[in-house]
Structures are given as C-alpha cells and as structure tokens.
Amino acid sequence: MRKLPVVLVAALLLTAGNLFANDSKTIDPKKDLAIQISELLDKNSFILDEHDLTAEVLFTLNSKKEIVVISVDTEDEALERFVKSRLNYQVVELANAVEGKMYTVPVRITG
C-alpha cells in the first residue's frame, strides 16, 4: 500500500515531463526549410524516362537569411546546375536562422 503514492508521483512527473518536451509551438527549422526549398524547386522542366532524380543539397544561410549552396551530391549534372541556380541567394523565412550553420536537405524530382 505504501508503494501506491510513490508510483502515482512518478507517473505524474513522467506525464508532466512529456507535456513540456512536446511543445506544439516548436517549429523544426529543417522541416520549414525543406518546405520552402520544395516550393523554390517546384516548377521545373525535367523530362524523366524511368527513374526519379535525387540529390543531397548541403547549404548554409548567410546574415541576410539567403541560401548559399555548398554542394549538390548527385550524378546528374543538369540537376546539380538546376538546384544551384534555383537556390543560391534565395531568401528564406526562418525564425531562428543561425548564420553559418550547415543544413542538408534531400531533393527528389519525380516524373
């Protein structure tokens, strides 16, 4: 019988900890950037035969919240040029932008 209050207090503490950890107002900056990047790359003229084009884009943000593409890891040169031309120096809206922080976003062009 003495263990019941201890178990209830432990359950209450765990529940309160989970509520504070899952703050719904927290925005994932990487997800927000991925959405904005997808909008920037939305309209394209790629004609795909059988497979999708994929790339890993490594970039940073400068002091003006502009994307500065560091590298585009893909085997398709046209996709690399396209991504660089569409993303370089485009301003993004990000509340907690950290100048110089590196981000990696996967890109996939589907047919």
Image (tube, rainbow, N blue to C red):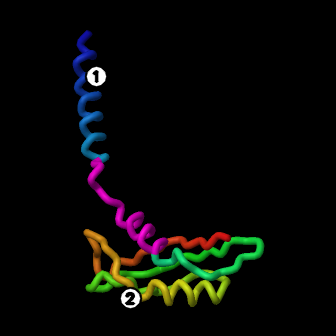
The crowd level at tag 1 (other Cα within 10 Å; few <14, some 14-19, many 20+) is few
The crowd level at tag 2 (other Cα within 10 Å; few <14, some 14-19, many 20+) is some
| Disc ID at residue 7 | 1
Name the residue furthest top: 1
Q: Nearer the viewer, residue 50 or 45?
A: 45
The structure residue drawn at horizontal position 52% and vertical position 74%, both measured from the top left corner, is: 42
- In which quadrant of the rendered image does the N terminus lie? top left
Q: In x, y percent, where is residue 97?
A: 28, 74
The structure residue drawn at horizontal position 43% and vertical position 88%, both measured from the top left corner, is: 88
Residue 94 location, quadrant: bottom left
- The answer to whether 25 appears left or right of 78 in the picture is left
Residue segment shown in magenta: 23-39
Q: Secondary structure at mark 1?
A: helix
Which residue is identified by label 2? 89
Q: In x, y percent, where is residue 101?
A: 35, 77
Depth-wise, is mark 1 or mark 2 nearer the camera? 2
The structure residue drawn at horizontal position 40% and vertical position 67%, both measured from the top left corner, is: 30
- The answer to whether 46 appears left or right of 40 in the picture is right
The structure residue drawn at horizontal position 34% and vertical position 82%, both measured from the top left corner, is: 91
Three-letter amino acid code at the position of disc 2? Tyr
Q: In x, y percent, where is residue 48?
A: 71, 76
Q: Nearer the viewer, residue 105 or 110?
A: 110
Three-letter amino acid code at the position of disc 1? Val
Q: Secondary structure at mark 2?
A: loop
